[in-house]
Amino acid sequence: MTALRPETAGRVRFAKRVRRPWRLAAEASAVVVALVVAFPLYWMVLSAFKPAGEVRSANPVPWTLDPSWDAFRRVFEQQDFGRYFLNSVLVAGTVVTASALIAFLAATAVARFRFRLRTTLLILLLVAQMVPVEALTIPMFFLMRDFGALNSLLSLILPHLAFSLPFAIWMLRGFVKAVPEALEEQARIDGASRARFLWQILFPLVFPGLVATSVFSFISAWNDFLFAKSFIISATENSTLPMALLVFFDTETPDWGGVMAASTVMTVPVLVFFVLVHRRLVSGLGGAVKD
Amino acid sequence: MNGPRKAAANSPVHDGRWTPWIYLAPALTVLAALLVYPVYQLGLISFLEYTQAQVSGGEPTSFQGLGNYTELFADSQFRYVLLTTVVFAAACVTGTLAVGCTLAVLLTRVRALPRLLLMLAALGAWATPAITGSTVWVFLFDADFGPVNRVLGLGDFSWTYGRTSAFALVFLEVVWCSFPLVMVTVYAGIRAVPVEVLEAAALDGASNWRTWRSVTAPMLRPVLLVVTVQSVIWDFKVFTQIYVMTDGGGIAGQNLVLNVYAYQKAFASSQYSLGSAIGVVMLIVLLGVTLVYLRLLRRKGEVL
């Protein structure tokens, strides 16, 4: 056995050397795939900066020698685009903050306590994640009408808050679990009350996970056009970004430069948010997946 | 102020039994009012006669029993849309998993720089909101100004005109924006396989393929299960892409899927009860998927 070892190790090394062209091929294909995957985003930003004539050219080229802000200017001058942008920020911001706080409390409850119905509750949270949000537009519409919330930003905030909670709780549970229980023990011995432990010790420790989880509530609120379309009927000043984008898009001859500029304005904030938190996102998803 | 609060915190009522429920109270309130109640309402409306007349209060609502469901399943368009949805979702799930898993394996075979590039590109696709992803893909494949037709030499072929090509376009966008989750999760899963185990397999003379089949794949099964179920749920209820890219379900509704169909029934033709009935059908299908998933988890003896 021991005598065989060097030979086997040699074979492994040999195999590695043989595979070298394969690795180069793999790396080449990885780079090509990366370019293909990134191309739509590149094209979006490029077209947003191209002058109108180049966007409407029958032979589009993947560069521009004459970048301009014209398309962005058109977008921001159209209707109340700035106002829509603020509305979107307000809706997404409120949903993210409220959902993070509520989910943090709930995740602490299910991660730190044993109580009756706990497993049932977790299963229900899992089931809740697959409810087709769009199908609930109908009852939600009547609920908002009876509530007097139609045409207000509240009619956009409340549904998204509810729809983002189950996943947020589910994912945060992993982050709360990762904080050692000995810490809680220690805090109690030092005389900290439960509330104090919760907000001054646990909350800061879980905060990075909270931010990562928030990406998903942010995206769903930021991306929504269905509720905006269905609930904001007469008060167009309360409309949101996706609706403005669709105004550009939904014509016989769309102003593609404008559509791409508006799309860029809508995509970049999410992109930045995503890149900032992606490490925690991956570990958090890993946790949510493993459990 | 501080005194009584401290006492309350240490009292048995606050300690243990009620604390989790106090922490859960805000979440449960929101979920009960804005998720459970609407689902109940959805079910209720699906048993009623509910059109514009009832909404405006012109006519009283009347109980229809299973009438709406009978009407739905007698409607050939509904059956067609249901079948389309299942086939389209199956195609999207297969495509997403195939691309995601292939690229995850590819990631393990390359050095840091190509891996970083691919990760960043995938992250970008993942982060793109469904609505802007849709507008960008339509532009890429635009008959007059899109680069794809130029490169492929398709002239002014319109992708959104034909049923199949429109679905193909939506399929590409859906795979583009959903493969990153699969890739990242499966890659993390492969990475989590202990190096010693792989070395042991190599020392025992196992081929690459054999190592993959007998060591890596079984260890990946839980991860694969989760991403499959997640993809099935997402792709079955795809809405934004179809709605935006095919302009509300395509020419004469040729690209309708259930979710869009329900919305059009309810809000375009004011047949709220039929729209709700479609929603209930979707809910039941997805509930079935979730129950199968839970059962598989149970069988493996995983605890929640």
Image (cartoon, coloured by chain):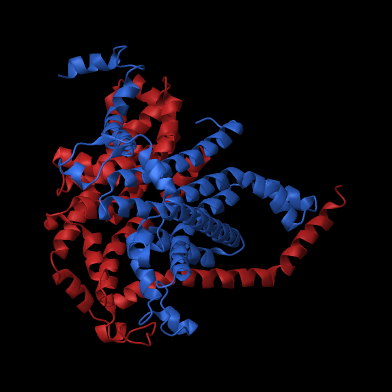
Chain colours: A red, B blue
Name the side, left or right, on which A110 lies relative to B222: left
Query: How far across and how far down the image is residue A163, in percent?
Result: 32, 42
Name the side, left or right, on which B140 lies relative to A12: left
State whether residue B80 is above or below residue B155: above
Query: How far across and how far down the image is residue B237, in percent?
Result: 41, 51
Q: Is residue B275 visible?
A: yes
Q: Is A16 in front, or is A281?
A: A281
Specify the quadrant of the image occupied by residue B174.
bottom left
State whether residue B188 is above or below residue B112: above
State whether residue B222 is above or below residue A124: below
Query: How far across and how far down the image is residue B227, in percent?
Result: 52, 48
At a point 30% along the width and 82% down the height, the residue shown is A55
Q: Is residue A183 visible?
A: no
Q: Is A241 in front, or is A227?
A: A227
At a point 36% along the width and 16% down the height, the residue shown is B17
Numbered label tally: 0
Query: How far across and how far down the image is residue A209, in percent?
Result: 38, 43
Q: Is A103 in front, or is B286?
A: B286
Specify the quadrant of the image occupied by residue A71.
bottom left
Q: Residue furthest top?
A: B12
